[in-house]
Structures are given as C-alpha cells and as structure tokens.
Image (cartoon, helix red, strand yellow):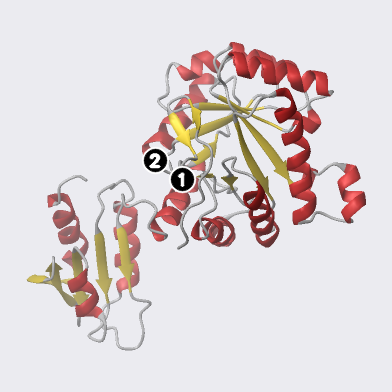
Amino acid sequence: METRRDTKKIFVDNVPIGGQSPIPIQSMTTAKTDDVDSVVSEIRRLEEAGCDLIRASLPDMDSVKAIPLIKERINIPLIGDIHFDHKLALEAIEQGIDKIRINPGNIGSRKNVEKVLEKARENNIPLRIGVNSGSLEKDLLEKHGYPTPQAMLESAERHLKICEEFGFEDLIFSLKSSHAPLMIEANRKFSEKYVYPLHLGVTEAGTGWKAVVKSSIGIGTLLAEGIGDTIRVSLTDDPVEEIKAGRQILRSLGIISSGLDIISCPTCARTQTDIVPIVKELERRTEHVKKNLTVAVMGCVVNGPGEAREADIGIACGKKEGLLFKKGEIIEKIPEDQMIDRLLEEIEKFPEN
C-alpha cells in the first residue's frame, strides 16, 4: 500500500479529516429529518456500529429547525445535505450544524454562494463540495460529450475557484460516480493537483454483495494508493450495513485494526465438517465485537492447522470435530455442535484493545 497523501486537516466539530488523521466512516439518515425521534434512533444504531459522522438531508425549514433537537441527543457530528436553496444553508449554520454538503452550482447565483461562505467562515463550519457524474453542468457535458474524469475535475475546480477567490478554504471535496473506474480516475486527477481532503464513495452503488464489491473496488483502490480521507459506502439498504462494509474495507487494507478478522477456507471435497453455517453464525454473533483479533475456522488438514495456529483463536476441523488453537497452542478437541460457543467463550476472555 502506498504512503498516504498528505492533505489539509479540516475539523468537523471534534472529528479531524485529512492531515494523516484516522479515516472516519460516514453514513446518511433515511428517516425524515423533522421526525426527530426516528432520526435519533437511527443515528444511535449507527454510532453503535462505528459511524463517525452522520449526514441528514435538509430539504426544508422544518428539517433545518430540527438540527438542535437532534444534536443534543447524539454523540457524533451532524452534517447537513443542502441543494437549491442557500437560505437553508444559512439557517442550518444558525441552528448549529457541524458541516454542510453543497453543490455551489445548484444553490443559485454567485452572490448566494458567497453568503453561505461568509456565514460558514464566521461560524467555523467546513463545507463539502460534492461533484456527482450524474449532475454535471450542461456546458461540461456538451464540452466532453458525457461524464468523464476530466469533466468531473473541471466541475470541482469551478466550485473551488469560487471558494478560493472569496478566501474560503475550509473545504472537503468528493468526486463520485456509480461507475467505479470513473470515480477512481476523477479522484486521482484531483489528488494530483490539490491538497484538500477527499471524501470517497461510489454513489448509488445498489444493493447486496454486488454493491459492496463495487464500493470496495472504488474506495479500496484509491485508499491503497494513499488517496482518501473519509469514506461512505452508499448502499440501498439499512445504513448500518454501510458502516459494516466501510469498516471491513479499512480493516482489509490494514488502516484500522479494531474488530474481528474472521478467516475461513472456501471449502472443498477434503472437508469433513460443514463449516459454512458455522462461519456465518459466528460472524452474525460477533458483529458487535470491537476487539482486534484474528479468528480462523478451517476445514481440512492441508492449510487448516497452520492457519489456525497463526490466528489468535482458531479451529482446524476434521470429521465432525476440530482442534481448538489459542495463540498457536492446541487447547482441546471440540465436537462440531460446540464450536461456535467455545469460540465465543475464548473471544470473550481476550481483553479489550
């Protein structure tokens, strides 16, 4: 993995983004923002899953007025997503929003944009400039023919120029697309020229494992190249699933170490224990565990003993039973129907990180 690109450090309340800070994981609420109880309940679930920043859509003044009611009941920074009406952005800042995501191209005249920049500067509120391949300016589409990495870069630069000419540089950028290769190349181009932190995501990725794979390729490729300062995995699903996927991307790259790393063999004709349901149940019952442990569930004698021995805890399965390893030492032989419970017992014995 390449050395991480050095960027400006931008604070969203007490969470730093960029400047070699840890990479925070974001998500977005799905409940109507003025339904305060529903939004708070959703955010608390996301906090428990490991969400570091949460964004809510602010389409009207009722949702904007809910900001302080939400903030007093949550523990992570609240970001406002605003389009078309700069007055919503101004009022959101008044109500205590921690960051605003805008597209300067769709909130009116340059004068209106500058009003938002002035208000944000007065209140130390950062902005995320969001460029999306699906909503590029008409003149850029006419120039390039269709969304291209260069078109996305030029859109970002157009918005950046407005901000810098006004003297506002408390900025985070995102260049997103539902097409992973386009998203990857657009972010590469931006990172070659600018030191502003980047929010990474493959937008509108879809549902299920296909969406997770698409997001992992887009986000993971850039992170492996040292590009990216915060991430969101955009899934058509419960937002908690976005956090799980984001944490797994970061863990797979060695960027974070908290949470179990469960390794298991793909199975073959040599296996004599059906480990598929064992691994799935183990994953389900350890979703909440934040301990930095490697747990191995292996199905045969070829790689099983070695992999299990290298893990913090591991089982090398034989015929309807397995050897339990802990830190390389064999602890005991376990029947198949006791494997999950014994693994959970051993996981529980390890201290918190």
Look at the image and tell me in which quarter the N terminus lies.
bottom left
Q: Residue at x 34, y 54 (%)?
A: 284
Amino acid at the residue labelled 1: Ile
Find residue 127 and report its image quarter: top right
> What residue is shown with label 2?
50
Under circle 2, the secondary element is loop
Q: Is residue 133 left or right of residue 228?
A: right
Distance from the alpha carbon under mark 2 to that under mark 1: 6 Å
Find residue 128 and report its image quarter: top right
Q: Residue at x 67, y 47 (%)?
A: 175
* Disc 2 packing (10 Å; few <14; some 14–19; many ≥20): some
Find residue 211 and report its image quarter: bottom right
Comparing 339 with 119, the one in front is: 119
Amino acid at the residue labelled 2: Gly
Q: Is residue 213 left or right of residue 104?
A: left
Query: What is the total number of numbered labels drawn onto the structure image?
Result: 2
Q: Residue at x 40, y 25 (%)?
A: 75
The answer to whether the residues at label 2 and label 1 have Cβ atoms under 8 Å apart is yes
State the image coordinates of residue 219 (x, y, percent, origin top left).
55, 55
> What residue is shown with label 1?
243
* Disc 1 packing (10 Å; few <14; some 14–19; many ≥20): many
